[in-house]
Amino acid sequence: MPREPSETAGDADVDISRVEALARVRFLLLDLGCTDQEIDQAVEDDALDLLVVDRILVPADHRLTQTEVAERTDIPLDVAKRFWRALGFLDVGEDEAAFTDMDIEAVHIFQSLVAMGLVDLDTAVQMARVIGSSMARIAEAETAPGSTPILMGSGDSILDADAFAAQAGASIPGMARLLEYVWRRHLQAATRRAMLHRARGSDEGIRPVMAVGFADMVGFTMLSQHLGDEELAAVVARFEELAHDTVVALGGRVVKMIGDEVMFIVQTATSAAQIGLSLAEAYAGDELLSDVRVALAVGPVLVKDGDFYGPVVNLASRLVGVAHPGTVLISDEFRQALREEGTTDIDTRPLRTRTLKDLGRVQMWKLIRAGTEPGADSRRTMRWERLGEVLRELDELRERGESVMPRRGAGSVPVEPGGGDPVGS
């Protein structure tokens, strides 16, 4: 069903604008290889904006089927499909002309990496999987509501097609150059880390020793039940910003953000301790966010596809689940590492051992800055209690509103005292 035009679409000025916009878009699409019949059909289907997106982002003079791609690249069809899926693209029919010269070039790059012996087939496919996953996330972030003016359309496919065409021509090449710049910088850092690891005498197959940390925002589930979409998005954005800035500024690296949790790694226990304490302090002093729980562990880790695995990661993840708001928990091994590194501005306090899932009894320590008074955490506890009171008041206001709303509606059925939906009671 065609989308409704804007409220002013009947005005003469808007009609003229649509005619002019259609003329510009038609000229562009013809230059990109479309036919007048394809353009007219897109206008009739109210999908001209979608046609413009397809042709600008994946330009092609002609389209190919997957069989034709396999023939032109001399690659087995099953291998081509495996590579395609690894990149995260949906399967297409064998007779569907969905591929372009860009796909041919990508397959040639894939083949050359294997042919030069840089990677074997399985490794190349796994690399494609990581690239596809990362690029998909970047693309989703770029097209999220409010993230770019290009996608803040009017609802009229002709006007939106014209607006996208006008802005995308400049923004897309710039974004491509930015992605390459960031990739080169990160590749430089990752290669240096790998070379330094080998230079320290580590044999192949020996896992690097890293400090691993998790920070988890307290009460996020409860907050998400009381906030609208915009408010919740603001909370998540602020959480990610504060976590990323704090970790990176102190020499660490954010591995991933998982909603209300951040995982980070760093070379030394001392650096991890500074990051952990700084995270707890930063969130305690932020007006928008609640406190965080932080947990740290250190030891050998398995590095795979940009992520980290192993018992040390599992231990830090389990510890953060039992930490109190605003506190930093560490493992016994982490405390020993701090001693070996000669850290003097950080103290630890013993806590009772806890049984952690899949890990058994674990001795835990609370991390504090040297000279911290025993009651220094009281303001965080009070702050968390105040947040709980606010949420309870919101609950009461919502319940009052729900009880009043039916009485105001015309023809509404009176609510009996003590009545209501038993599911929500």
Image (tube, rainbow, N blue to C red):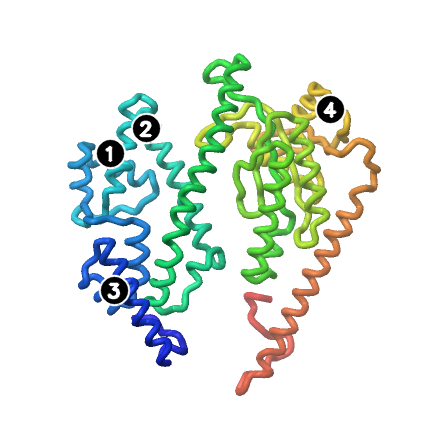
Sequence-wise, the earlier of marks 3 and 1 is: 3
Percent coordinates x, y for residue 361 in the rendering = 64, 29
| C-beta proximity under 8 Å, tags 2 and 3 | no
Q: Of the residues shown, which amino acid type is indicated by label 1?
A: Val
Q: Is residue 193 above or below residue 32?
A: above
Q: Of the residues shown, which amino acid type is indicated by label 3?
A: Ala
Residue 321 seen in the current view: no
Crowding at label 1, few (<14), some or many (≥20) Cα neighbours within 10 Å?
few
Q: Of the residues shown, which amino acid type is indicated by label 4?
A: Thr
Secondary structure category for the residue under label 3: helix
Residue 96 seen in the current view: yes
Sequence-wise, the earlier of marks 2 and 1 is: 1
C-alpha separation, residue under disc 3 versus residue under disc 1: 34 Å
C-alpha separation, residue under disc 2 versus residue under disc 1: 10 Å
C-alpha separation, residue under disc 4 versus residue under disc 1: 53 Å
Label placed on residue 122: 2
Which residue is located at x 29 percent, y 22 percent? Answer: 116
Q: Which residue is mark 4?
A: 343
Percent coordinates x, y for residue 389 in the rendering = 73, 59
C-alpha separation, residue under disc 2 versus residue under disc 4: 44 Å
Residue 22 or 279: which is nearer the viewer? 22
Sequence-wise, the earlier of marks 2 and 3 is: 3
Residue mark closest to the camera, 2 vs 4: 4
Which residue is located at x 52 percent, y 39 percent? Answer: 256
Q: Which residue is mark 3?
A: 42
Q: Of the residues shown, which amino acid type is indicated by label 2?
A: Asp
